[in-house]
DNA sequence: GTTATTGCAAACATTTTGCACCAGC
DNA sequence: GCTGGTGCAAAATGTTTGCAATAAC
């Protein structure tokens, strides 16, 4: 979850929808609200399971369609631009990620100093003909919880898991 | 593709396998070689299609198993730790990514200065109880090719696509 | 000769699509 | 009454698994 009261964020969301000519439906509101309230970067399935408690008829297909639609409007985004399909975030401000390679948990960190640090990247990207829209730093390692447990095997990259 | 002659890289790969007690099969060699030769971060399907020209009996299941196995040994890694399932890289040295949010193309950049820049991240991660193993900067925007084409709609995040 | 690895086919998981129905302007 | 949005079911896509045959050590 990020700065700004929930009320403000929902208001902003409604404004964004209106501006884009999108209907503000209970489904969209509920999905956005849940995404803006959690910090667990849930998948469509997880969102479906949770939001369903509020809207029992909500279908999984609607969750998928809604996430795509809201991403189009900029209210929501996939956790990573690198094709990390399946995990979503309503924090569309610049922030970075701590990724546990054991359990897959992703923690947001907003650290303005890191932004400054990545600035040389823009010049570099320009040299590649790139127009830079933003950046994110992905820091990987083991979270406190996983450091405790002894690694069995030389486990490296955690792929595919969803975090606890 | 990264530094070191292909011959050296293959030798290193063989050594890695041996050290881990893995058989060096033609399938593993071919998959590694192809991954180490391309810079397109291919998916399992794409690898299968390409390597098949060399090993016509290669099955897709073997490609999946091989990628997992080689990742375990550290010879290969998913493009991102953030669950970017489906795209692989044999460049296991520290490097960063230019991601085109229109076409999805991913370009590697190795820029030591960027590494230094991200150093404050380690301290920050430690404060979260994290043991840092590494980091990668993901710079997103539009590539030269996509900048040409006028954006239709306010297209934001390209999800799921594979790049041309 | 053992044991790990492959290829196949089937299972499974995830995401997308087509279409009829419903709700809001 | 239109239009856009939802829900359902089916299809497409992507990934994993069990197991017999095969090849590496």
Image (cartoon, coloured by chain):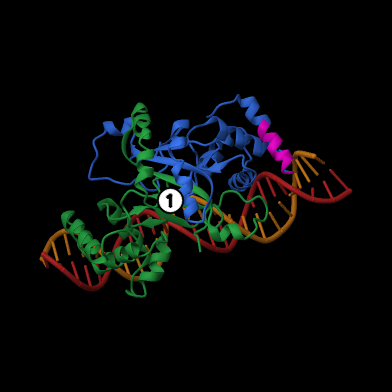
Chain colours: A green, B blue, C red, D orange
Q: Report the span colored magenta.
A: B12-21
Observer able to see residue A100 = yes
Whether residue A55 appears in magenta in the rendering, the answer is: no
Observer able to see residue B110 = no
Q: Position of residue A131 (x, y in %)?
A: 30, 34
Q: Position of residue C22 (x, y in %)?
A: 23, 73
* Image-based side of C17 in relation to A19, left or right: right
Whether residue B20 appears in magenta in the rendering, the answer is: yes
Magenta: main secondary structure equals helix
Chain hosting mark 1? A
Read off the residue under disc 1: A97
**Residue under the image location 33 percent in, 70 percent down:** A58
**Residue under the image location 51 percent in, 48 percent down:** A140
- Tell me: residue A68, above or below residue B121: below
Q: Position of residue A24 (x, y in %)?
A: 21, 64
Q: Where is residue A21 in the image (x, y as percent from the top left)?
A: 17, 56
- Does dot 1 land on a helix, a strand or a loop? strand
**Residue under the image location 60 percent in, 37 percent down:** B31
User: Which is more toward the observer, B10 or B133?
Assistant: B133
Q: Quadrant of the N terminus of chain A?
A: bottom left
User: Which is more toward the observer, B65 or A80?
Assistant: A80
User: Which is more toward the observer, B73 or C1?
Assistant: B73
Number of other residues with Cα within 10 Å of mark 1, as a class: few under 14, some 14 to 19, many 20 or more? many
């Amino acid at each position: 979850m990020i700065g700004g009261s929930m009320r403000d964020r929902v208001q902003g969301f409604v404004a964004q929808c209106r501006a884009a000519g999108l209907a503000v439906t209970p489904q969209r509101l509920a999905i956005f609200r849940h995404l803006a309230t959690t910090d667990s970067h849930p998948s469509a399935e997880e969102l479906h399971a949770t939001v369903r408690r509020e809207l029992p008829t909500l279908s999984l297909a609607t969750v998928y369609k809604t996430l795509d639609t809201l991403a189009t409007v900029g209210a929501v985004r996939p956790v990573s631009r690198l094709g990390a399909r399946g995990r979503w975030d309503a924090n569309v401000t610049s922030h970075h990620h701590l990724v546990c390679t054991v359990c897959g948990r992703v923690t947001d960190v907003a650290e303005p100093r890191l932004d400054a640090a990545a600035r040389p990247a823009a010049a570099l990207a320009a040299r590649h003909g790139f127009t830079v829209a933003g950046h994110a730093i992905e820091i990987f390692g083991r979270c406190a919880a996983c450091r405790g447990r002894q690694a069995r095997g030389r486990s490296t990259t955690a792929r595919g898991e969803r975090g606890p």
